[in-house]
Image: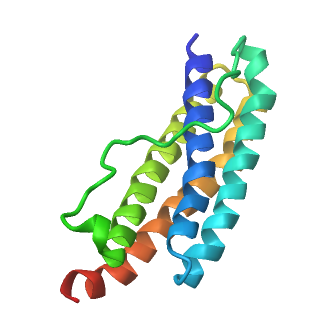
Amino acid sequence: MRIGVALRELHRSESAMAVELPRVADRHPEEHEIRHVARDLAEWSREHVREIEGIAPRYGTDLSGPEHPEPSEEGERELPGEGSDADLALLADLKRLYRMGGGVALDWDLLGQGAQIIADSDLLAVTERCHPRSVRRMHWARGILKAVSPQILVG
């Protein structure tokens, strides 16, 4: 059974979201919604991490390791001029959050499917608590992207 592998990956990716969301908020303090909502969403990730840590021992999964993993460097500089242009940096940060959030939401969905197959009601309950929040987090990032991208791209 590979449930432990899925739990380990979710632990890593939720931990990365818990680190990246406040970083984005700190990089864009003038963006009030991003500053406040990103911090709330990071708390959701920390709660998800605790949920994963609570169920992982049932699957013989050791989640010890870096307490705060660094987010992937992949796609770190996504747009030309991003380093010197605050608007392009915001766009790149939001794209990264959206992609990260989509991956996490998909992983929660897959874990829920596995929980159904093995009829683990406790694991299924965890996925039912965490998956909807992960989807909302992804939709938040997409909504902000759709709201700010026209002005950034034509400004």
Along the line of sight, which residue is nearer the eye, 103 or 64? 64
Along the line of sight, which residue is nearer the eye, 81 or 12? 81
Q: In this view, does 129 lie to the left or right of 84?
A: right
Residue 81 lies in quadrant: bottom left
Q: Residue at x 44, y 76 (%)?
A: 144
Q: Residue at x 78, y 17 (%)?
A: 57
Please, is residue 101 above or below residue 83 in the view?
above
Q: Residue at x 57, y 68 (%)?
A: 25
Which quarter of the rendering shows the C terminus? bottom left
Along the line of sight, which residue is nearer the eye, 131 or 21? 21
Where's residue 97, x and y in %?
A: 45, 57
Q: Residue at x 60, y 23 (%)?
A: 117
Viewer can see residue 112? no
Which quarter of the rendering shows the N terminus? top right
Viewer can see residue 81? yes
Along the line of sight, which residue is nearer the eye, 113 or 147? 147
Q: Is residue 90 left or right of residue 24?
A: left
Where's residue 91, x and y in %?
A: 34, 70
Q: How many marks do you count on the picture?
A: 0
Where's residue 17, x and y in %?
A: 57, 49
Q: Which residue lies furthest to the front in this view?
A: 84
Where's residue 85, x and y in %?
A: 30, 75
Q: Is residue 97 left or right of residue 17?
A: left
